[in-house]
Amino acid sequence: MGLKKETSEYKMEPLGRPALFYLPEEKLDLNPEIHLKIHKFLTESFGGYTTADGLVKGYWKNNSALTKDRHRQYRVSFVGKERISELATFLAKLTKEIGEECVYLETGEDAWLLYPK
């Protein structure tokens, strides 16, 4: 992890590795308990998060058909690669619960399609 940076004008404190993931807005809006579950996990496990919704759209090929959806973006940060599996496990369970085939996840420099088993 990077070192703290400080000058007479500012102080910067590193937060570690960023992770970003997208969840389908429509399925989140249909189940308000999902919002609470995500909020609780991200604040308790990672100390907080940032979310963006609205015009976050995704396009991808599903077999040969082009699919699109609106998504809510979530972003967290953490120290240590081993924390990726904690986030991935939560997302896999959540993905299954909301009936998605997979979700998009970025961890640092890597991008993944995360499929629940």
Image (tube, rainbow, N blue to C red):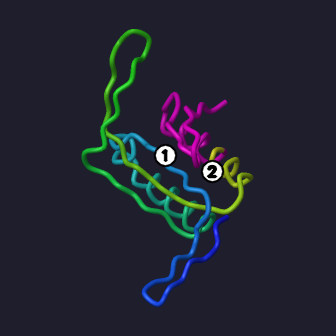
Q: Is residue 17 above or below residue 64?
A: below
- Give the residue type at disc 2: Leu
Front position in the image: 38 or 50: 50
Counting from the top left corner in percent of width and height, residue 39 is at 49, 62
Front position in the image: 36 or 114: 114
Quick one: which residue is furthest to the bottom in this view? 8
Indicate left or right for 85 with 14 as reference. right
Is residue 103 a member of the stretch shown in magenta?
Answer: yes
Say which quadrant the C terminus sits in.
Answer: top right
Identify the residue at image location x=57%, y=44%: 109
Tell me whether circle 1 and circle 2 mark residues in contact (CB < 8 Å): yes
Determine whether the residue tagged by mark 2 lies in a helix, strand or loop.
helix
Circle 1 sits on which residue? 21
Identify the residue at image location x=52%, y=77%: 12
Write down the quadrant of residue 56 in the picture. Answer: top left
Is residue 55 a member of the stretch shown in magenta?
Answer: no
Determine whether the residue tagged by mark 1 lies in a helix, strand or loop.
strand
Circle 2 sits on which residue? 87
Counting from the top left corner in percent of width and height, residue 10 is at 45, 84
Identify the residue at image location x=67%, y=62%: 79
Pick whichever of labels 1 and 2 is earlier in the sequence. Answer: 1
Counting from the top left corner in percent of width and height, residue 106 is at 53, 43
Mark 1 crowd level (few <14, some 14–19, many ≥20, 10 Å Cα): many
- Give the residue type at disc 1: Phe
Counting from the top left corner in percent of width and height, residue 3 is at 64, 72
Residue range of the region highlighted in magenta in the rendering: 89-117
Front position in the image: 17 or 90: 17
Give the numbered dot on residue 12. none
